[in-house]
Each structure stands twice: as structure tokens, then as C-alpha cells.
């Protein structure tokens, strides 16, 4: 029987590294080393009851749906209208195709790697996962892997397909509209505006400002408000104290849930929306955007389309092993309501 030590010697790594790859603890292991170790495991016939052997069983008709959390939630991550809606759509589409969903959420990537190594699934759908980790998971499971809203772009040679939103266009459309409405100061607020989809949305906003030719008349500020509500509340207080009352001001939140927070925070302090300050959001996935007062101006994305595309790609790849999955970019639209 092949041992971990023999695999480590062939790969030129420590037995600890091989063991970590087998058990999904690969945060500090390069994608190239993972691929080499996985190949040696297959070629040399190493078997572990809770590791790779489970991946060679017959088709399970189960698809793992995994969220890499980047926010702190008071309740379940599914209380977020974005994630709650998209996971619901994915489950519905999988059910229509005769498949079952296994859902897992964690902020610790080693936990995620360990999970995908031990579950017997036919495919993996990832949400909000860094491109590097998407590639590692694909190398581990050697099954169809697709990522919705990846952070960064997986290598084309990795075999990981993506479903993305035209985030830059969304930032552009909203900022262009706010500039046309005469807003002189626009505060853009996101969890982390220097990475992922938020960064793309900020790029779109800055492009809209350049295209408007009003760079001397309009100011756009991008703020990382924080990943937990206490952090964001401190930010809202500082922003409120710094508002320029002589400037027509708007707050463009890069998620509707932040816009709802800002709306409540300001109205509790006697600020009239939109008379004193305009508020806009991004997502348009919650009925609250229609029912909040005043109704929220937002960028709408089609979460059903994202979910349907992801499920269609992985199921086709499962049932047609020679099928090469496609990546898709989903369009956005501006919805103008009463908050601006």
C-alpha cells in the first residue's frame, strides 16, 4: 500500500504538506503543488477513507453550494437578501434537474477545503470566492466547479467557469444618473471598496465622473465602511458629521442592505430623504427596496439568471464529461425611485 511518505518523497515536499492536501488544509500550499500531489495520489493509488476515495464513487446527484463569508451577520448569512435569494434560486433549479443541494458557509477557507474533500458531490457552485481558492477546489475535486461573483479571475487553464455581473457598468449607470440629477458630492459606501465587485463598481463611478466632464464641480468619495454593523455605524456617524450642507449630496451604497441601514440611520436623526440627502443602492433583489420609505433607487441585477446559468453549466458538465463550461457576464439596469 502506498504511504504518504512515499508520495511526499516523489513530490519533494514534507509529509505534512501531503497530509494537508489530502484533508483540504491547503491555505499555504501553492496551486502547482496541489496539482502535483493530487496527480501522484491518483497515479500511485493512495486511498484514504475520508479523503479522495469518496470522490471516485458513482454519481451522487448532489451539488455543493459554498459561500465564503466576507461579512459579519447578526443572524444566518441567508438573512442577507442577496445570498438568501440566490441560494433559493439555485436549489429550485437543481431540483428541476433532479439534483440535490448541499449548502455550506464558512469564513475559514481550510474548513471549506476539508468539506469539499470529504463530501461526495458531482459538482461545486461557489459564491464570492477568491479566484485562487476556486482553482484549488477544482484541483481537489476534479469535478465541475463554477463560481458566482468571484474575487478576481481564475486562470483560463484552471477549468473553473464564472458567472459575473457587469459591476463596472452598474457603478457607471448609477453615478451618471446622480451627476445628471445635480448631485455635487457622492459618497460611495461598500464593505471593502478596494477589492472584488465593490472595486469594479467604484471604477465605473469614476469613469462616469470623467465622462461627465464635471470633475471640478462634482466630488466622488469611495469609503470602506466595514464588514460588521458596529464598524459601519461608526462610519455612518462620521459621514453624517462631515456632510456639507451647502452641497447637494448623495450616498451610493454598493449593496441594498447598506442603503437600508443608511436610510434608517439618517431618518432617525431628522434627515429628510431625498430632500436633504439622496440615497441609492445596488442589487435590487429585496422587496424591501420597493417597500422602504422612500422607495430605493438602485441598480438591479438578475439573480435568477445568475443561478440558472450556474446550474445549467455544471449539470451539463456532469452529464456530458467532454463539455467545456462557459463563463457568463450578466447585465444590470438602473431603477429610479423616490430616494433620489
Image (tube, helix red, strand yellow):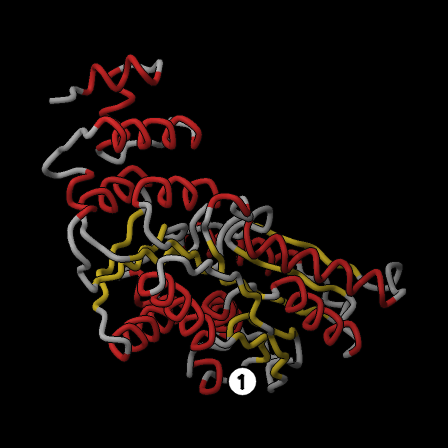
Given residues 65 and 201, the one toward you in this image is 65
Residue 98's place in the image compared with 223, above or below, is below
Residue 319's place in the image compared with 128, above or below, is below
- Looking at the image, residue 320 sits to the left or right of residue 58; the answer is right
Given residues 88 and 323, the one toward you in this image is 323
The quadrant of the rendering that contains the C terminus is: bottom right
The residue drawn where x is 48% and y is 86% is: 290
- What x and y, as percent, mark residue 81? 38, 71
Residue 247's place in the image compared with 242, above or below, is below
Crowdedness near tag 1: few (<14), some (14–19) or many (≥20) residues, C-alpha within 10 Å: some
- Looking at the image, residue 293 sits to the left or right of residue 93; the answer is right
Tag 1 secondary structure = loop
- What x and y, as percent, mark residue 254? 56, 63
- What x and y, as percent, mark residue 101? 23, 65
The residue drawn where x is 80% and y is 77% is: 180
- Looking at the image, residue 87 sits to the left or right of residue 276; the answer is left
Whether residue 269 can be seen here:
no
Residue for badge 1: 294
The residue drawn where x is 49% and y is 84% is: 293
- Looking at the image, residue 221 sits to the left or right of residue 76; the answer is right
Q: Quadrant of residue 60?
A: bottom left
Amino acid at each position: 500500500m502506498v504511504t504518504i511518505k512515499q508520495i511526499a518523497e516523489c513530490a519533494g515536499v514534507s509529509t505534512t504538506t501531503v497530509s494537508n492536501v489530502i484533508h483540504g488544509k491547503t491555505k499555504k500550499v501553492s496551486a502547482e503543488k496541489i496539482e502535483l500531489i493530487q496527480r501522484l495520489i491518483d497515479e500511485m493509488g493512495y486511498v484514504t477513507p475520508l479523503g479522495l476515495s469518496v470522490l471516485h464513487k458513482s454519481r451522487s446527484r448532489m451539488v455543493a453550494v459554498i459561500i465564503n463569508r466576507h461579512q459579519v451577520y447578526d443572524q444566518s448569512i441567508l438573512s442577507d437578501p442577496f445570498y438568501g435569494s440566490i441560494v433559493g434560486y439555485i436549489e429550485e433549479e437543481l431540483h428541476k434537474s433532479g439534483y440535490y443541494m448541499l449548502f455550506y458557509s464558512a469564513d475559514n477557507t481550510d474548513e471549506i477545503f476539508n468539506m469539499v474533500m470529504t463530501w461526495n458531490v458531482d459538482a461545486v457552485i461557489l459564491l464570492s470566492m477568491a479566484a485562487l481558492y476556486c482553482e484549488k477546489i477544482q484541483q481537489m475535486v476534479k469535478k465541475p466547479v463554477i463560481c458566482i461573483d468571484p474575487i478576481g479571475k481564475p486562470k483560463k487553464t484552471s477549468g473553473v467557469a464564472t458567472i459575473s455581473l457587469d459591476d463596472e457598468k452598474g457603478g457607471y449607470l448609477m453615478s451618471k444618473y446622480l451627476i445628471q440629477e445635480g448631485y455635487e458630492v457622492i459618497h460611495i459606501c461598500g464593505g471593502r471598496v478596494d477589492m472584488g465587485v465593490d472595486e469594479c463598481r467604484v471604477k465605473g463611478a469614476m469613469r462616469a465622473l470623467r465622462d461627465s466632464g464635471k470633475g471640478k464641480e462634482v466630488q466622488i468619495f469611495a469609503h470602506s465602511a466595514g464588514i460588521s454593523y458596529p464598524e459601519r455605524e461608526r462610519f455612518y456617524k462620521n459621514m453624517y458629521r462631515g456632510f456639507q450642507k451647502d452641497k447637494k449630496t448623495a450616498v451610493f451604497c454598493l449593496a441594498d442592505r447598506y442603503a437600508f441601514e443608511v436610510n434608517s440611520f439618517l431618518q432617525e436623526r431628522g434627515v429628510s430623504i431625498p430632500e436633504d440627502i439622496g440615497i441609492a443602492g445596488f442589487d435590487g433583489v429585496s422587496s424591501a427596496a420597493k417597500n422602504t420609505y422612500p422607495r430605493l433607487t438602485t441598480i438591479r441585477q438578475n439573480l435568477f439568471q445568475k443561478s440558472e446559468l450556474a446550474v445549467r453549466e455544471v449539470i451539463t458538465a456532469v452529464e456530458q464529461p467532454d463539455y467545456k463550461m462557459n463563463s457568463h457576464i450578466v447585465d444590470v439596469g438602473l431603477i429610479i425611485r423616490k430616494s433620489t
